[in-house]
Image (cartoon, rainbow, N blue to C red):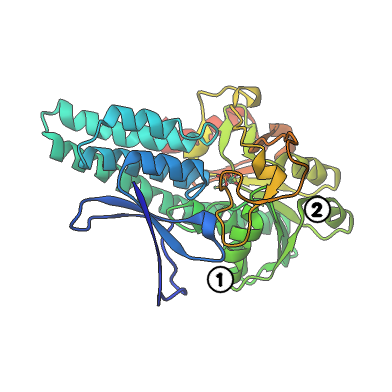
């Protein structure tokens, strides 16, 4: 079950965490900052069981690859702590969205810890604690990864663009709303801002669900960054005007060959960047690199409901309400609505991970860098 309550009198300079575990007297809960309500309202969504979390994942109340992994892990811990069927919860959580590999990675981390505790003879409560410890660990690791990606990413920007005064184009949302820390691509832009080297952050609005306009602009404003919002289809003219020094995006899954699945609209930016000789940089933790997916064509791309395209969410309504928005196309119009696209490795200048930078992007270089954290 999920419950919503608005924050009042909160100090918004610190903000509400994107996800947290809580243990009120009524029992453990996973509390989310409901991203469907941003930027208008900062409202928490309290999940008391795995089905509520599954629904929150599907509706994008919680979203973005690394955060989905953390949510999946806490979801398993929640099912265990509340005495629900952990198997059933793990399957439902891992299958809630198909493209971001972090979700199943996070579910597996907590599930393995739970199973290992049971195998050691732990009783239910101790096994639940083991699942929670694994979720908390993943949460911490993601925050640490974020700091390291920001460092590597800023060093790469400075190397590629020695003049400083970076003008960076980004797509979708990759900041603290997707992470245990400050995010992936956005964390790099933020590091550049703090170092006084960000001249402008160009923010793609990211149709149809407007993660750029609603969420990245919200994060950029909160951090005092110089940012400008543009419609996705204005990006071409921005490149043509010579106004973009680098593209920084995140990833939902990186295949073993270096193909990058990310928010729909990323691939056209990669094509534009290549044509205009602008670096196209992907920032993602190693948990997003999936050695089990050989190449881009093997990545399952989530198809979302057509109403997200044929309707615009009404003010003060959740963006992904079941067709309750304002129609912008004739009734009955069919829509093509893939949530992600796949950029081939030859269009990617570099993949920045917490373990280092992969450039040029080859299967061997990617395996080598990711192997550092996997102890290979
Ligand atoms: O559909 P969403 O909003 O979950 O898509 C998120 C993205 O595409 C992000 O760019 C991606 O998860 C990388 S965030 C580190």
- Say which label, 2 or 1, has the lower sequence index: 1
Residue found 69% across the figure and 47% down from its top: 311
Residue found 65% across the figure and 53% down from its top: 210
Task: Indicate the quadrant of ligand 1 in the picture.
Answer: top right
197 versus 263 height, above or below: below
- What residue is shown with label 2? 235
Q: Answer few, some or many: residues within 10 Å of disc 2's Cα (few below 14, many 20 plus, some between 14 and 19).
A: many
Please provide percent x and percent y for residue 329.
77, 44
In the image: residue 9, left or right of residue 276: left
Image quadrant assignment for residue 270: top right
Q: Answer few, some or many: residues within 10 Å of disc 1's Cα (few below 14, many 20 plus, some between 14 and 19).
A: few
Q: Can residue 247 be seen here?
A: yes
Marks 2 and 1, how far apart in space? 24 Å
Please provide percent x and percent y for residue 5.
38, 62
155 versus 64 height, above or below: below
Single out the residue that lies furthest toward the front.
331
Helix, strand or loop for disc 1: helix
Residue found 79% across the figure and 57% down from its top: 244
Q: Is mark 2 within 8 Å of ligand 1?
A: no
Q: Can residue 191 be seen here?
A: no
92 versus 268 height, above or below: above
Give 189 or 217, whichever is nearer the viewer: 217
Please provide percent x and percent y for residue 345.
69, 33
Quadrant (top left, top right, bottom left, bottom right) of the C terminus: top left
Image quadrant assignment for residue 163: bottom right
Task: Tell me how many marks there are.
Answer: 2
- What residue is shown with label 1? 222
């Amino acid at each position: 079950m999920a419950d919503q309550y608005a924050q009042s009198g909160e100090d918004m300079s610190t903000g509400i965490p994107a996800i947290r575990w809580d243990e009120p007297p009524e029992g453990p809960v996973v509390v989310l900052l409901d991203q469907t309500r941003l930027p208008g309202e900062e409202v928490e969504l309290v999940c008391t069981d795995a089905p509520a979390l599954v629904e929150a994942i599907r509706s994008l109340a919680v979203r973005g690859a690394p955060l989905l992994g953390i949510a999946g892990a806490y979801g398993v811990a929640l099912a265990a702590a509340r005495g629900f069927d952990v198997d059933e919860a793990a399957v439902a959580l891992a299958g809630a969205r198909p493209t971001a590999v972090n979700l199943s990675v996070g579910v597996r981390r907590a599930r393995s810890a739970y199973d290992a505790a049971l195998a050691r003879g732990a009783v239910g409560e101790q096994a639940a604690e083991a699942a929670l410890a694994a979720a908390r660990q993943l949460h911490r690791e993601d925050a640490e990864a974020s700091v390291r990606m920001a460092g590597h990413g800023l060093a790469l920007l400075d190397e590629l663009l020695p003049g400083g005064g970076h003008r960076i184009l980004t797509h979708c949302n990759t900041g603290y709303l997707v992470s245990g820390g400050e995010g992936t691509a956005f964390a790099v832009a933020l590091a550049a801002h703090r170092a006084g080297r960000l001249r402008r952050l160009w923010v793609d609005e990211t149709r149809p669900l407007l993660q750029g306009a609603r969420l990245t602009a919200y994060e950029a404003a909160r951090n005092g960054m110089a940012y400008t919002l543009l419609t996705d289809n204005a990006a071409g003219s921005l490149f043509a005007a010579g106004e973009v020094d680098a593209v920084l995006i995140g990833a939902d899954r990186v295949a073993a060959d270096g193909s990058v699945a990310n928010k729909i609209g990323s691939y056209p930016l990669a094509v534009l960047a290549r044509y205009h000789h602008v670096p196209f940089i992907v920032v993602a933790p190693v948990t997003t690199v999936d050695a089990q997916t050989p190449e881009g064509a093997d990545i399952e791309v989530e198809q979302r409901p057509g109403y997200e395209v044929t309707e615009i969410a009404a003010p003060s309504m959740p963006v992904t309400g079941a067709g309750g928005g304002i129609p912008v196309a004739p009734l009955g119009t069919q829509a093509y609505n893939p949530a992600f696209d796949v950029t081939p490795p030859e269009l990617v200048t570099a993949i920045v991970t917490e373990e280092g930078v992969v450039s040029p992007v080859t299967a061997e270089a990617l395996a080598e860098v990711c192997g550092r954290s996997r102890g290979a």
